[in-house]
Amino acid sequence: MLTIGARVAWMREQRRCVAGVGFVGFALVTVIACVLVGRRLTHSSWPLAHAQMPLVGFAAVCYLASFVLRARGWRRLFPLGQEPNQCRCLASVGAAAASGAVLPFRLDYLVKVGTLRRLSGVSVGLEAIALSIVSLGMVDAVAMLPLSVSATATSSASLRGPLLIVVGFGLGCCALLVGSARLVRLPLLRRSRRLQRVSDHVSAHRTQRGRRSALVAGFYLFGCWTSRAVGSALLLSALGFAFSPTTALCVLCLSAAAGVVPITAGGAVANLGATAAILFALGVGKNTAINFSLASGLLLITSASAAAFAGLALSLATRAFPRRAPAALHA
């Protein structure tokens, strides 16, 4: 007979297995959908039918590296003493990115929070997760500033308007981080306990430890966006388009700007359609633009699922080793 604790642990393992099967099924459905849409719109067997596979492989590695860097940056932004381990952050980031391809209205945040809380390890409260996500969004926008400024300076006049929105958003987040110490003193924030907690957490980045954590997180997130831009440039080259970091930066920054709008953020149709429209505006051919939007979505979902599986496996492994170590000592 199983004890109550063993039964609860067994049920948790069963839930994780079901979640893993769900991710595999989700990846298969995504592959089939990309094949069908590619055949209908471009008359090719699938988006990567005529691509150079070595470049596609390098692009996939860059996409996977971007999730690893993002998870490492996010972990740096948790309140002191409530940081989860790196494996949980990686699984949470991967699961949220994979589900965010089909979930609209930023519902992927629920997946991110749920995954982080369900995995074993240090107990992390909802408030700590919410505060870290707020900090992640602000530091993320600041980390994208060098890329968005470069894209604005090198793009055509027709695209500078949307790109300036990305630059302005990053500058606004930078101003909030710099002026967070004065922000805490505003009477409006003192009236609300939740707003006061958010402002206190943001202003904590002004301390020596908080400043160091924010800088390290910013470097990780800058590496995340840079890796994503390199992957996009390699994927465009694999599909026959000339290697163009400028085009990749414009696509990356404008897609990020579309993700800020809650109504259009998330959802495969919205994301793929926005990417194809941006490439059309940049003068990319129809077949290349559609194939790139489908292929990039496919690689992002696949690499995000791989990151989620890796984080889950490492989390379970780190949980099992401490249990086996005492047993080996007693033996």
Image (cartoon, helix red, strand yellow):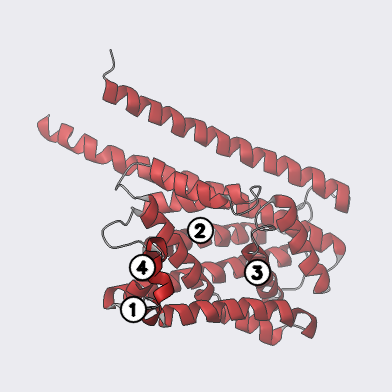
Tell me which residue sits at (62%, 57%) in the image: 57
The number of numbered discs placed on residues in the rendered structure image is 4
Mark nearest the camera among 4 and 3 is: 4
Per the image, label 1 sits on a secondary structure element best described as helix
| Quarter residue 148 falls in | bottom right
Identify the mark nearer the N-term, 1 or 2.
2
Q: From mark 1 to mark 4, how far is it between C-alphas?
A: 10 Å
Question: Which tag, 1 or 4, sits closer to the chain's start?
Answer: 4
Looking at the rendered structure, the kind of residue marked 3 is Ala
The residue singled out by tag 4 in the image is: 201
Asked if 145 appears above or below 10 in the picture, the reply is below
**Do callouts 4 and 3 mark residues in contact (Cβ within 8 Å)?**
no
**Marks 2/4: CA distance?**
24 Å
Question: What amino acid is labelled 1 in the image?
Answer: Arg
Q: Earlier in the sequence, mark 1 or mark 3?
A: 1
**Mark 2 or 4: the one toward you:** 4
* Residue on which the image places disc 3: 257
Tag 3 secondary structure: helix
Name which of mark 2 and mark 4 comes first in the sequence. Answer: 2
Report whether residue 209 is seen.
yes
The residue at the point 41 percent across, 64 percent down is 192
- Under mark 4, the amino acid is His
Amino acid bearing label 2: Phe
The quadrant of the picture occupied by the C terminus is top left
Label 2 element class: helix
**Residue where numbered disc 1 is placed:** 206
Mark 2, residue position: 67
Residue at 82% from the left image edge and 72% from the top image edge: 281
